[in-house]
Image (cartoon, coloured by chain):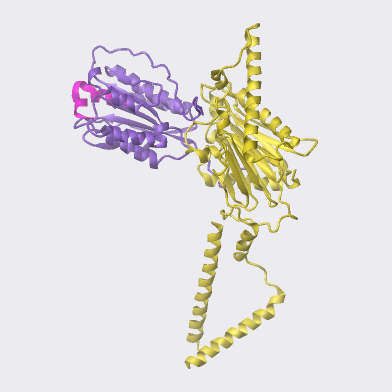
Chain colours: A purple, B yellow
Amino acid sequence: MPVPNLQIAKRRLNFYYILDVSGSMGANGRIQALNQSVRQSIPRMVEAAQSSPNAELMIHAITFGSNAKWHVYPGIPIESFVWQDLSAGGATSMGAAVGKVCDDLETNMPSRSLPPVLVLVSDGHPTDNFDQSLARLAQTPWGRKAVRIAIGMGPRHEIDWGTMERFMFDMDLQPLHAANSADLADYIRWASTVAVAASSAGSSTGEDGSAIHMSAPPIPPTVIDFGDVF
Amino acid sequence: MDTRLQPRICSASVRGNSHVLRDIPNQDSSCYKFSSSKGSWAAAIADGHGSSAHPRSDVGSRIAVKCAVDILLGYIESNEANSIGLEEMRAQLAERMIQAWRDHISEYHFDQKEEQEPGSSVQELSDREFILYGTTLAFAAPYKDAILLGSIGDSDGFWRSESGLVRNLNLFENDGDGIGEETHSLCLRNAKKFFTLVALQVGSNGGTLVLATDGVKKSLRNDVDLNNLLDYYHGLAATDQEAVEDDLRAQLEELTTEGSGDDCTAIVIHFPCDHEGAKHVAEETSNKGIEAASISVLNNGNSDSLEAEDQSDGEESLDVALLKKKPLSPKKIPQIVLVTAGLILLIWAMAAMSKRPIFTTKYLTQTWLEMKARVLSKTNLIMKKAECVRR
């Protein structure tokens, strides 16, 4: 006999793309590669969502150039998600973007959600107070528990690896380096699907009983496209 | 043992939808036993961790509930806890349950190893090997005039009183932020530190205690739905105990399929209302707010971590009575006639003093409206007061 007035709900999994659209992203076809990579990741994310039918995967995207602004907000179910291309220009307000994500994690996350997934893609150094926003992310309960992946794109020496590593605090993973569009496509696809699976993998306990540690799944080998180096 | 604490117990456990899809076994376990000699009982649930770091957590949870129930029955019946406080009981139970669990896990682990590699040397299990079997544990048993509720990890304990009030006894959630997938576990080296123990005074009004793994709560939209679920099983257990187990199993299947996808397990422990002992049985009402149970809690020696209010049942009954329509008693008719006559006399006197005609339609209507406004104002005041007390 059904229980009267009972509403059963799937667990929400919020996925956030945090994407660099600063002026440097306009060079060497980086922004085009980013648009293409995100678009190509969608079918794989749909597959990941279908293999976890008890999770409701909601896609969000925020961009940062001279300022941070939501590109996809509020979250859209992956099944109806369509990517609108970005264009590059301006500074690198990465801290402001992380701050806006914190706003959302603090106010719009049901307590019974799965840990959110944050994927940061950037080719340079933040031009605002990134550390302040990062400290806030580390203090926000859902920020602390989020699966966080950072992907640096472009020449290795141009990327702020310190920032990338700090963004991935407490993770058993190192930031990823996408040297060309094929790398980027692979890594975004990997981050989009494996991180979703890791978020919904079930309960765990750390050695000290206080932290969850996502074990690092193997990153797929990249087929290098020699003709398309950033 | 207090005879009021003789419950009716039912349990069900279903494999999670996501576990079916990934070909993973049900990692939850439940167990309850009644002692044949002294009329005591004990119940336990355990939720084996689902992540890949704990591939044998189904074994871990099965061993955990069996150890917990056996230790509780022996502990209660031995009366050895008669002269000690709750904190000492917490420490003793934690130590015994953890040790028993580790012993049985070691035995199982080496049996398995012996089967796979006959003649392999027996050595002590490492912490890393215990992690393979990681599980939560929550248990309940009567002790004197209270129910002991213990837990480690994020499994839940809910108390639903006869009057419809719900209290979540999940101390893990109260302790931390209660979000995400992390949990305390029996497999931790310092597991004893995370054990909690609650003594719940049930009283004579009865109620229903539900132990549930987190798959249940995570399948529901919010606490309102949780209350609806508890209300339903409290009612069903009180009226048709035979139906609870099948109904519960079907409900858990629906929860995991349409909700969290996690394994779902629950034990429903119903304490019938003791009508002789109860001064008042509060009318079934959807208003929640007064907790009729008194609770004291111990977690890692901190006896002040939570102290619930102990509200008297009499107070609640009084407030319910204020809002309740009662049939007119024949004995009250003369009083009503006298009061009505007095009111008419009063109206007449007021009219005489103001030198106005009293039997005009306009005057009577005006007077009636004034009286109605006063009565409504007074009623609203009483209702607000009752609402405040309830909160």
Q: Give the range drawn in magenta.
A: A21-39
Q: Name the residue furthest top.
A: B119
Residue A226, image x and y in percent? 25, 11
Query: Dominant secondary structure of the magenta stretch?
Result: helix
Residue B148 or residue B327, whichever sits in front: B148
Write down the quadrant of residue A122 in the picture.
top left
Residue A121, image x and y in percent? 30, 26
Q: In this view, does B319 lie above or below A208?
A: below
Q: Is residue B9 above or below residue A151?
A: below
Q: Is residue A185 above or below residue B378?
A: above
Write down the quadrant of residue B62 in the picture.
top right
Residue B167 or residue B370, whichever sits in front: B167
Which quadrant is home to the N terminus of chain A?
top right
Q: How many marks?
A: 0
Q: Is-magenta flag for residue A23?
A: yes
Residue B349 or residue B277, whichever sits in front: B277
Q: Is residue B170 left or right of residue A198?
A: right
Write down the quadrant of residue A81 in the picture.
top left
Residue A181, image x and y in percent? 27, 19
Q: In this view, does A220 lie to the left or right of B240?
A: left
* Residue depicted at 63% across the width and 20% down the height: B105
* Residue B216 visible: yes
Which quadrant is home to the C terminus of chain A?
top left
